[in-house]
Amino acid sequence: MTGAESLIRTLIASGVEVCFANPGTTEMQFVAALDKVEGMRCVLGLAETVVTGCADGYARMAEKPAMTLVHCGPGFANGIANVHNARRAHTPMINIVGDQASYHRSLDPPLTADTEGLARAVSHWVRTSGSAKQIASDAAAAVQAARTPPGQIATLIVPADVAWSEGSGPAMPLPVTPRPQVASDVLRTVAQVLRLGEPAMLFLNGQALSEAGLAAAHRIANATGAKLRAATHVPRMARGRGRVPVDRVPYVVDTALRALAGLKHVILVGAKPLVGFFAYPGKPSLMAPQDCATHVLARPDQDAVAALEELADEIRAPRVMQVEEAGPKPRIASGPFESEAFGVTLAALLPENAIVADDSVTSGRAVFSAMFNAAPHDWIQSTGGAIGHGFPCATGAAVACPGRKVICLQADGAGMYTLQALWTQAREKLDVVNVVFANRVYKILYGELRTAGATPGRASDTFFDIGRPDLDWVGLAKAMGMEAVRVESLESFADTFRAACGRRGPFLIEFLIHKWNESFD
């Protein structure tokens, strides 16, 4: 049994069921092993950033890691953007990187790179297998590392001769560390803070955004008057009718400062401190008021749901709380694209138990809060700020949850980073409806330019405008093997989206936005 087959059998024994791959010469032994071994679904991505984005979306919904298989250091480098997003989302991910044979590497062939250095930039655990006898135990350790709370990136680099040499056979799975519990004294301290009656907010992320976590946070908020807010970009959140309607902290600094003004206490639950995405001249980096105290109820690796439930019991909050409706009623709006009107329309049409993968950037900024009263669904989005996440994340989510409709909300500029994922959706016949917001501009950059105190001019118009020529998303989708339609009004969108959701398989709707220069807030 080769080292490659030993690795594949170990991963399968450890519960890894899907391999997202873009292999090359140094991975041929793994491909041969996958030909021989049953139990691993193989999914091809036509770019490494698609491969890693698919693994991210899969793991968020399956709640277990997938395997990626990429080619040498440059191949891994191509996928780093979505590994970065996965790392910020605490996604469990196992990257297998085929590399130069150990005796060949010293001759400096063309694909030689600092593969370990590249991996360490975005991984929590990195190892290069030194022998075929070691590779199975390395694979078991990689799975264990990836599944360590709250979820980690594990990258295993395998020289080609290690993969083709005689291995030891599969290794036994290693135990997974459970989430640590929050100490009783921490619970009591936070309870005392809430009993002060001063303006307070629970800042929720990660596990706290599950349906159970939100329900416990709702008990606390109703008993104490504390506000609830989610992170600006959520890794996964339970939303829709019957779920607690928690809004995100706004992305725009001035809007966030207004939303959080007056707070005296911020309590972190699976979240890091409230830091803005970027620094701006004359604006603070921290979004909470200067005189606001920050308290930690649960770190990202701890059991945030149990902590919230125990805190609710500590303050004697009622166990059953009615969830009040918030936000606009779902309805079919009319006229040209407008973000909130699109949101209430999507809310009216969203299938039960759907998954929404959001990489819509500015066009979708008001969609989130307009969908509190949609059918129950999960919301996932890029948490690391690297655009081009939506298409592959939706693809991976559809592989993980074949019985659920996946809706991808994708900005056109960001979508060009990973449009190859549409081909994977078509090939795998995945049940994804992709909605591309075609404003033909990097609109977010105009807002950032103004926030930095500058005025758009010749160079910015050149760099931010993605027209001349206009992208043809219908044509691009069809070239990838996917049916597609262009719409220019909310009425047409509603008709097309309803029809797309009434059938299985991938579909793309290009929503043409003529007036892209609406206010940035």
Image (tube, grey):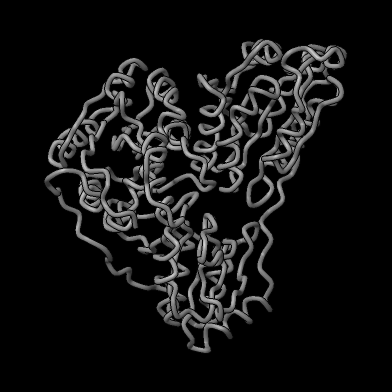
User: Is any part of residue 355 visible from this angle?
Assistant: no
* Image quadrant containing the N terminus: top right
Rendering coords of residue 130 (x, y %): 86, 24
Whether 23 is drawn above or below 515: the answer is: above
Q: Is residue 124 left or right of residue 315?
A: right
Residue in the picture at 66% in, 23% down: 74
Rendering coords of residue 284 (x, y %): 53, 67
Q: Which of the 4 quarters of the picture holds residue 437?
A: top left
* Closer to the camera in the image, 346 or 489: 489
Rendering coords of residue 492 (x, y %): 14, 36
- Which residue is most to the bottom? 196
Residue in the picture at 55% in, 75% down: 311
User: Is any part of residue 350 visible from this angle?
Assistant: yes
Q: Is residue 493 left or right of residue 194?
A: left
Residue in the picture at 59% in, 30% down: 79
Residue in the picture at 40% in, 78% down: 222
* Closer to the camera in the image, 383 or 240: 383
Q: Which of the 4 quarters of the picture holds residue 516?
A: top left
* Closer to the camera in the image, 410 or 374: 410
Whether 229 is drawn above or below 457: the answer is: below
